[in-house]
Amino acid sequence: MQKMEKFLDSTSICNDGAALKERLNRDGYLFIRKLLPSEAIMRVRTRLLEKAAEGGWLNENTPVESAIANQAAACKDPEEGYIKVFRNLWADEELHRLRTHPKVLKFFEGIFEEPALAHPSFVQRNIFPQREGFDFTTQPHQDKVHIGGDTNYAMWVPIGDCPVEKGSLAIATGSHRFGVLDTKVGSGAGGMDISVPIPGQWVTGSFDVGDALIFCDETVHQAVPNQTNELRQSFDARYQPATHAICEYALDPYAGCGSWEDVYSTWNSTDQQYYWKDFELKTVPQDRSYYEARDTMAFQMAENGDTEARDALLRIVQRDNNPGKIKKAQQLLFELDGGSENSISVPS
């Protein structure tokens, strides 16, 4: 792993919206201690670990709360085995309430100087330990190509303590000032990694429960490898001024998790369901050009037998609306996987 400096701690100015905005514009990120109540995070941690254990992700011979991973079950998004368990975690009622916690919304409103909109769609991540046979770590990327709309900001929160060696996040300071960088097919977010030299100084650090990292949608970031024996869990939600344009895609549940009706059918309360409908939203269509370029590259790679295209092909099968592309991706997956039928099955 490349040498990285420590995060600049912005906790001392967390109640000064103007100072936070100035630093966010300068560095592309903010690191805030105890932005979320630790007891709320720990309640969610317990719930998600129980669901992970039910899905076979944890070592059955150790206490659930220790989060010791079952390495034989190691998987990642967008693999079918991952989505099958993940959709139950993503729908968790108390998890959804963390990203709309009053303290979080007040924090962003101080920066935006207007009401803050939490995007309905967000990501809950589960990263298995890095081992021989499973060496997945999210590579450097930008969120802008995936999230679209006007400028928005991510809040990344580990669900529990997260020392650097457990798979902390890292930021390229100031990289947001260079616009959207060129991409290539990869195994990271959205099947796209950055393909050019990355500007800025890499920084990272350990997180205590309740700590949060906020960054701009054009800030380059990556995960540090999970070198422990535990499952690393986190979530990242997106925020923007409520009057700014939001991509239509960001109003849908995470891919593979069904409809909002499916999600809410597991909740005990109607509180905060469809909360975004209380806003007069300005929506814009998703810019698919980055995905089309990725898919063209993935098809070419797969036709040459390059298995690095596999994750991008899975995303086409699961998330594209073009029947012709889906069929082509299914066939290429079938060929890459040596004729295994499991390679082309699609989560319902």
Image: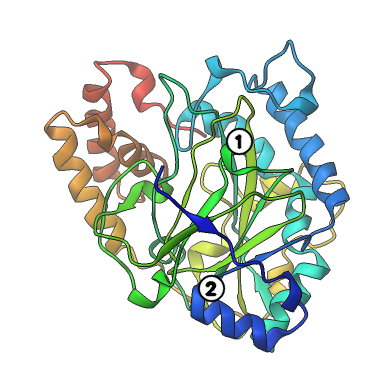
Q: Label 2 neighbourhood size at 10 Å, few (<14), some (14-19), many (20+)?
A: many
Residue 318 visible to an observer of this rendering: yes
* Residue 242 visible from this viewpoint: no
Amino acid tagged 1: Phe
Q: Quadrant of the N terminus?
A: top left
**106 left or right of 3 in image:** right
Q: Is residue 233 left or right of residue 219?
A: right
Q: Is the Cβ of the residue at disc 2 closer than 8 Å to that at disc 1?
A: no
261 or 233, which lies in front? 233
Residue 310 image position (x, y, % from top left): 30, 34
Provide the secondary structure element on which disc 1 rests.
Answer: helix
* Sequence-first disc among 2 and 1: 1
The residue carrying mark 2 is 152
Residue 37 screen position, x and y as percent: 84, 57
Near mark 1 (Cα within 10 A), the count class, few <14, some 14-19 or many ≥20, is many
Name the residue at the left extreme: 304
- Residue located at (62% from left, 38% from top): 87
The image position of residue 329, as x and y in percent, is 26, 37
Q: Which residue matches tag 1?
A: 86
Mark 2 vs mark 1: give the one in front.
Answer: 2
Give the answer, above or below, for where 62 lies relative to 45.
Answer: above
